[in-house]
Every structure is written in structure tokens, then in C-alpha cells.
Amino acid sequence: MAKIAAVKGTRDFYPEQMAVRNWIMEGWRQAGLRNGYVEYDGPIFEHLRLFTEKSGEEIADQLFFFTDRGGRALALRPEITPTLARMVNEQINSLARPIKWFSVPRLFRAEKPQRGRLREFFQWNVDVIGSEDILADAECIYTAIDYLRSVGLSSKDVVVKISSRKVLAALLKDLGFAEDGLEEVYVLLDKRPKLPREAFDEMAAEQIKDQALRNRLKEMLQRLQPEASEDSLSKLKVLAPEAVQADIVSFSDLFYYLELMGVADYCEFDINIVRGLAYYTGPVYEIYDRREPLRAVCGGGRYDDLLAGLGGQEVPATGFGMGDVVLELMLKERGLLGGAAQGLDFFVIDAGRELFSFSREDKDRCVLAVVSRLREKGFSAAFDYKRQPLGKQLKQAAAQKARWAVILGDETIKEGKVNVKNMAQGGQRTVGLEEFLSRPGETVK
Ligand code: HAM
């Protein structure tokens, strides 16, 4: 039979890739805990309706769905936010607020696989439920930056582009758009930065039939385009009509809090951020690689109506999702994946014919005994299954990325000593076996 290939848009995690994935997730978890969130998870599949109800077309078009034997329409989760809303709705009266939860779900979207976009990926989700204070939005944004900063991405590498659907809604209504037509305009505007100008114009003409209204929209967007030399939030304040000022004041607090948290240099107002998901109601943001501005590593915002929309009480909520695929590309391009390096602490070698025997007389000074004692002390240690000459065992140690080789030689071990070799730098020390085993970490300092 011919070999069966992996499905397009999925990844195999061989040990090297698995180490990267674990390292990324460990960093996410630590940042979640450090910022006061606790971890949750839900099922990988849900009722299809949970995702088609409130997330909007973009997600609905990308679902992997199936029917179970009882005829129920189910879907693999494309995001975890509806699951989170469902779970919180379930226990809303017993959960202490604000609910600060994070999760690292495996997600599935039937996308056209491309650089930074796959059909199966992981996402770090950080959400605050039960607070309408814009401080909660600020803390979520801070948490995302806290992680990115911890892996070496500075404000020169990444930018958090922030806007507000509330401010945008006020601006659009002021231009003459009807409240019930806003959703359509959001979808259109979300596509704007990703489309060539002509294609956008064509789409806009199709959707907004009133030419004068269309022109007013274009003009407003043009005036509010961010420019490197200018503080675009101040520009918004100056250009926005009176009716919008109240919303801008509360939105400005977000930037003020981010400044107090010491991350203002990562953040800027950008009118182009609208978000593709339908449920957002307030501040919205996306985090981009400054070198590749079309690829978001993270997206989120406030979604105050989702819990009620899914049958629960009116409970405000805000949060984000950060994807592992774009993140890994960004870190790789900058040589920042070093923390994921795998390797052993010790590789223990028997370098003498006499020691190869595993005889009872040598039982405390053979590789098996030394390896076991190192492991007992919490160090990672390995050895070669074949009793081979020193050179071959050293090669094996290098192949397993051992930091130190512990060499037991016929002569030295008789005197109760071992040689400890630094595999990276090549230096070697002779130390007493017992002294080494009682404090392995000290010996190799
Ligand atoms: P989203 O913008 O759909 O938001 O996804 C967030 C991030 O997940 C994206 O910026 C991207 O890095 C990653 N991502 C999305 N789709 C793919 C894909 N096909 N392949 C690889 N990475 C992908 C949400 O999912 C919201 N539920 C986030 C949220 C949480 N909002 C509030 N709380």
C-alpha cells in the first residue's frame, strides 16, 4: 500500500517540534498564572450551533463539522470563546467575579493552509468575565505583552494595534449609517487592510449603495490613518465630532492604564482594527509583527453581549487569543527559540573494558548505578546501550545534546574518581565519585 500522507494544514510534532510547542505553552501558562488567571479547558467538539450562532460568517465558513450517530450536528472547535461563555453561563451564580481564566486549546479551522495559517493550531486564550471596567481590557493586553516581552520580543518587534467598536460605531452613525447596518460595515472594514485598494473599492461599492455615504466613510478613514510622526489618538480626539467624544474619553483611559503598566511603547490606536468575529462590542485589538504587518499573532477585545446571546445572563467579558503558528515563525526568524533547546544534563560513559561487564563487584561504580543516582537527584541522565569505546560513547552523548559527560575509567574509578567533561567547551575535571554524586550540580558549576 502507498504511504498515507498527513492531512494538509496539520503538523506532525517530532521531538524537536514538540520541544518548541511545549516551551511556548509553558511560557503561556506561566504568563497566565503570573497575571492572576487560572486554567480551564472544554471539549474539542461541541454542538455546531454554539459556533454558528454568534461568531459570524468568517468562523461559520471555516468549520469542520459532522453528524454523530444520533443525528446531532457537531463541530470541532474553531475557537474556545463560545465554549468559555457556555461554561461560565452554566455556573454563573457560583463563580466569584471577576472570572480570570486562561486556556491553551487545540483548534480546527478549514482554512486554505498558508504561511501562518493552518487547519489545526493552538491558541492561548486569556479572558476576564464579569467586569465592565476598561482596566480588565488593559490587563488582558498587558498579559499578552508580558508574555511576548518574556520571550524577547520588544516594542521594536511587535505592535498592539487597538481600536474600539464603540468609537467606530459612533463615528459611523455620525456619518449616517444605520445601527442595524453596522455589522456589515465591520466585516467590510476588517477586510480593508488585507485587500488591494481597487478590490476594496469594488466591495465597498457593492455593499454601500449610497455613494455619498461611501465617500464620507472613505474620507473619514483616510483622515484617521495612523502616521508614524503623529499621535493618532490625539488626532481622533480633534477630528471626531462632538457625539463621539464621550466614547473617546473612556477609550483613552485604556491607553493611560497601559502607560501606567509600562507598556505604552507597544501600543497604538489604529482605526483599521475591527476584528472578523461578530461578537465584539468595545475595545478591539490585534498584535502584529512590525516586519510583516498582515499577519496577526493575537486578536481580542470586549464581547459584552456573548454570554446573554448564548442564553445566559448579561455579563460583560473581554479577552484575546494568541496563535502558536505565527508566534513560532516570528520567534524563529529572530533566533528566539533557544529556550526550547532539548538536552540532557549528564551522559554517563564507561570507558574501560573492565567496567563493561556490569559485574556484581562493580555494582556501585558502573554506569547503571551512576545514572540511577543522578536521576534520583532530579537530573536528566542517559547512557549508551552498547558497551563501546570512549569515542563512540562521546558521539552518542553529543547526539543526545548532553551538557556534561561523566566518564568512568578503569584506572580513575579504582581510586574512586570520575572525569566530568564539559561537552560544549571541552574542558574536563577529575572529581571523587561520591563527592560528585552527593552534589552533581555544584561539581559542574
Ligand atoms: P482570532 O482572531 O480568530 O480570535 O484568532 C486569534 C489568533 O489565533 C490569530 O491572531 C492567529 O494568530 C491565530 N489563528 C487564527 N486562525 C488560525 C489558523 N487557521 N492557523 C493558525 N493560527 C490561527 C479568536 O479566535 C477569538 N476567539 C479570540 C478571543 C478570545 N477573543 C476574546 N477572547
Image (cartoon, helix red, strand yellow):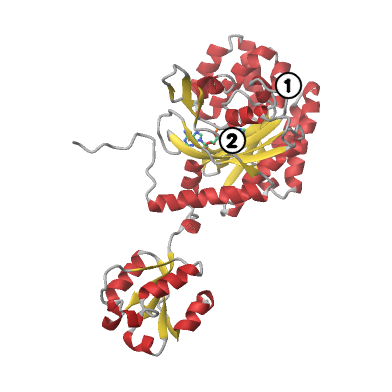
Could you tell me if the residues under marks 2 and 1 are in contact, i.e. CB atoms within 8 Å?
no
Question: Which residue is located at x 26 percent, y 77 percent?
Answer: 389
127 to 90, vertically: above or below: below
Determine the CA span between mark 2 and mark 1.
22 Å
Q: Nearer the viewer, residue 243 or 65?
A: 65
Q: Position of residue 399 (x, y in %)?
A: 34, 65
Closer to us: 173 or 430: 430
Query: Which of the two discs, 2 and 1, labels the residue nearer the N terminus?
Result: 1
Q: For this view, does 351 lie left or right of residue 377?
A: left
| Disc 1 residue type (three-letter) | Ala
The vertical placement of 1 against 311, above or below, is below
Assess mark 2: CB under 8 A from ligand 1?
yes
Q: Nearer the viewer, residue 156 or 75?
A: 75
Q: For numbered disc 1, what is the local secondary structure?
A: helix
From what the image shows, is residue 84 above or below residue 314? below
Residue 11 lies in what quarter of the image?
top left
The amino acid at mark 2 is Gly
Residue positioned most to the top: 210
Badge 1: few (under 14), some or many (20 or more) residues near its Cα, within 10 Å?
many
Query: Label 1, on which residue?
Result: 170
- 128, 350: nearer the viewer: 350
* Secondary structure of residue under mark 2: strand
Q: Which mark is residue 299?
A: 2
For the N terminus, the image quarter is: top left
The relative height of residue 290 versus residue 373 in the rendered view (above or below) is above
* Residue 111 seen: yes
Discs 2/1, front: 2
- Quarter of the view holding residue 241: top right
Spot occupied by residue 423 in the image (x, y as percentages of width and height): 40, 73
Q: Is residue 226 visible?
A: no
Determine the residue positioned at 42% across, 87% down: 416
- Residue 62, given in percent of the width and then of the height, sits at 46, 25
